[in-house]
Each structure stands twice: as structure tokens, then as C-alpha cells.
Image (tube, grey):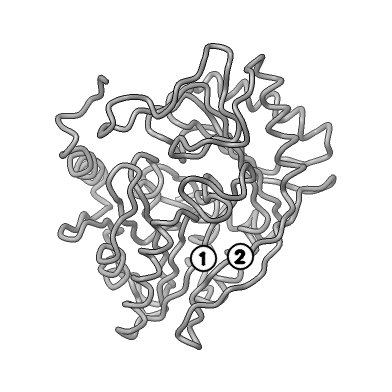
Amino acid sequence: MKKLINSVESVLQEQIQGLVEAHPELVLHQEPLFITRIDAPVQGKVALMSGGGSGHEPMHCGFIGAGMLDGACPGEIFTSPTPDQMYECGQAIDGGQGVLMLIKNYTGDILNFETAAELLHADGTAVATLVIDDDVAVKDSLYTAGRRGVANTVIIEKLLGAAAARGDSLDECVALGQKINNQGHSIGIALGACTVPAAGKPSFVLAENEMEFGVGIHGEPGIERRPFTSLNDTVDAMFQTLIEHGSYQRTLRHWDRQAGDWRETRQAKQPLAKGDRVIVLVNNLGATPLSELYGVWHRLAVCCAEFGLTIERKLIGSYCTSLDMQGMSITMLKVDDELLSLWDAPVNTPALRWGC
């Protein structure tokens, strides 16, 4: 293993310090570790918080700032942050209108965010939760009960950040987040595994003619290991899977503020259909050249046109990575005029910036 690190033990601290030093609009908090925007708490606005294991940069800390997150909690590489990080972050960013926790559906994240939500509620903070589960590849995985939360998280953070900035209430942000989550679909593939510093070796081994189809952002397996033949064949298969597997029922837990307890609701993923308008994210999982991502975009645009989807907006690049994994993911979110307006609203973060 060769990586630009000093030691496995110092990876997180040195990289987080570097991020904040490079972006003085962020504030680093220690013991426990979390990051907030410099003007937090923003009075009169719902505060958005997310977090998770490091190794997915720029998600989440790179999306802190005006028009997106108010704070985020980084864990060790591929390891959930702890409840005390989340609790202290929530207190630091609450501007009086409550805190919405955006949680990727991974077991460790779910358990720790739930504990933090209960602690914040006990202290009188209005708190709500949104579990994100956009991966269509597998129903359950090594890290989850249910579908995994992956790159649609980035789009949700952007759209809800804009909604909070325009003055939406906590309950309105939750309802909008559920709508976006139910309309977003993602799938990823890997041509090569990532190497976690603590492990010192790739998380799996592929033959020269193999790919992992439906891979997770920690390198966990997907639908199956398939032959790799060409760019077009790969994108076609991913697109077809997004279309065919975009409809399913599942049960999600959320914090009921009025009852002060957890509730389970049955929700339906809305499949993509001919005539839909979409935002598309072609996302680098870590080690895929930008030129190859544009090749993916070229083929994906053909697939969308032939099927009957209208691409309204797009992102192409590194947004939700998996260390140095050679691979990419595709996310498609069905949108309407309101969501497009929120997408176009100003945003000013280290990793996403326009209109400001």
C-alpha cells in the first residue's frame, strides 16, 4: 500500500485539519470532532446535519456552507461517527427552528444518529430525521438492513439546503426530503477495489475481465460479479437496472417530534417512467479519470433519450467517493419545477458552488 498519509492513526485528523485550513469558511470542533459553517447557528433557519465514515470525500464535510449543510460529523475511514459527535454538532448548529439529520442507510449510522436524536430531543431541541436509501442494487447488504444510502445523498443535501434557506419549516423539510428520497435511484460498478489504510490491501480482487455490478460505497458486493466487456454495455446494463428496479415498497423509521418516539412508515419508491424529467449525477467512486466519466455521460444521455427521459440538470465528477476505488455510479432523480428551482438556488460550499 502506498498512500499520501503519515500513519493510519493520524489519517482522519490531518485530512480534516487540511480541509478546514483550506476553507476558512468552515470551523473545526474537537473533542468531539465535527465541522460547522462559520456563521452557525443561523438564526431562524432549519439546520441540516449529516455525517458518516470518512473516505467518501467530498461528502459530507465538503458540502457544508450556505445553501447546503450547516454541520457534519466525520467518522474514521468507513466507520460511523459517534452519538456524542452528532449531539454536540446538533446543539452547535440549531438556530431555533430545529435540526434535520440526513442519514445514509447504514446500520452504524442509523443506530448512532438515533441515539443522538433522542439526546437532542431530551434537551429540548426540535429534531427530525430522514433516512436515505437510493441504491437499487440490493435489498440488504453487509452494512445495511434495506437499501443503501449512496450518491443521491448529495442531491438531497443540495435541495433541502435550498429549502431551508428559503424558510421552509422543519416538518416541510422532512416532507420534501421524503419526496426526493422516494424519487431518486442510484447504482454503482467497480473495476477495481479500494484500499482502506487500516487494512493495507484491496477489499476485493477482480480478474482483468470482471467488474462488481451494484457495488456499495465501502466496496461491499452488489448484484453479482459480471464480465466487463465495454463502456456502452456497462452503462446500458446500469440504466436498465435503474429503470427495472426503481419501484419497491419498504419500511423506514423516523423520529416523530410530536410523540417524542420512533415511528415506522411504509413508503414506495417511484420508478422512472417515459416522459420524466431528471437530474443526473455521474459520480466518480475514487480513481476513475474524468475523461472516462464523460464517456459514461455520452452513453447515458443516449439511453435517456431513447427511453424518453429529459435531462434537466447534471453533475459529472467526484461527489460521493470510496477512497481509491476504480469505478463510478449513476444517480437519476425525477424532478419538477420546484425541485429545479431549489437546485438552481445559490450554494457556496468547498465542493459545490454556484449562483453566489
Residue drawn where x is 56% and y is 38% of the image: 315
Residue drawn where x is 48% and y is 23% of the image: 288
Sequence order check, earlier mark of 2 and 1 = 1
Q: Position of residue 306 (x, y in %)?
A: 83, 31
Circles 2 and 1 in contact, beta carbons < 8 Å: yes
- Identify the element where label 1 is drawn: strand
Is 271 placed left or right of 353 in the picture?
right
Residue drawn where x is 70% and y is 24% of the image: 299
Disc sitting over residue 130 in the figure = 1
Is 14 placed left or right of 130 in the picture?
left
Q: Position of residue 250 (x, y in %)?
A: 65, 62
The N terminus, quarter of image: top left
Disc sitting over residue 178 in the figure = 2
Q: Position of residue 76 (x, y in %)?
A: 27, 46
Is 240 placed left or right of 23 in the picture?
right
Q: Position of residue 141 (x, y in %)?
A: 53, 46
Residue drawn where x is 66% and y is 69% of the image: 266
Quarter occupied by residue 215: top right
Residue closer to the observer: 278 or 151? 151
Is 182 placed left or right of 15 in the picture?
right
